[in-house]
Amino acid sequence: MKNLSVFLFVFSIYILGHVSGTGITITNELQFKKLLWMRCYSKDDVIGPKVLSIGQQYENSFRANIWGTTRFMCTLKQGPNYKHYQNFTAFKQYTGYDNGADWDWRAREDGIYLKKEGGIRKSVDMHKVYDWIN
């Protein structure tokens, strides 16, 4: 009975790590009154399409799964003609022990930037990750 109690305690601690939410944020920091078109999806969810005006942000919180397979893919396009775009992995869970992190994406004139806080891997300061595709 003692072994079962220890197992249940350790298992509950493990599961509680996955109850805490994680998520992605996408912010339009473009200039010249450009709109930002966005659409994101995972295996189970579709977000958008949505259009963000300058300074506007979209936040999506979710729970990472216990198998370590949670992924979100996103497409961003610059208005008004939406000629410049980028497809990218907006969130990736690395292992079952990784309860995720907050992935903060910023669309700017010269590219798409990321700041990541939390998760199993080291937090990352804001830096450019992607250039726009024409």
Image: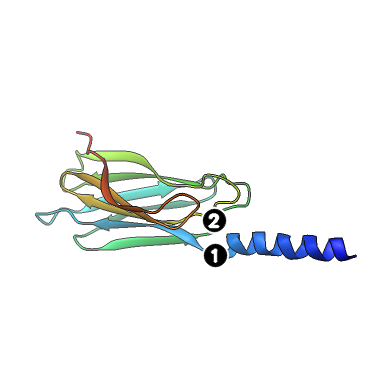
The kind of residue on which mark 1 rests is Ser
Percent x, y of residue 105: 31, 53
Of 105 and 8, the residue lying toward us: 8
Position of residue 125 measured from the top left corner of the image (x, y, whole percent): 30, 53
The picture places residue 99, in percent across and down from the top left corner, at 54, 56
Tell me the kind of residue under disc 2: Asn
Q: Is residue 102 left or right of residue 86?
A: right
Q: How far is the residue under mark 2 from the one under mark 1? A: 7 Å
Is the C-beta separation of discs 2 and 1 under 8 Å? Answer: yes
Q: Quadrant of residue 134?
A: top left
Quadrant housing the N terminus = bottom right
> Regarding mark 1 in the picture, which secondary structure is present there?
loop
Residue 124's place in the image compared with 19, above or below, is: above
Q: Mark 1 points at which residue?
A: 20
In screen coordinates, is 61 left or right of 82? right
Q: Name the residue under label 2.
A: 99
- Residues 104 and 8: in front is 8
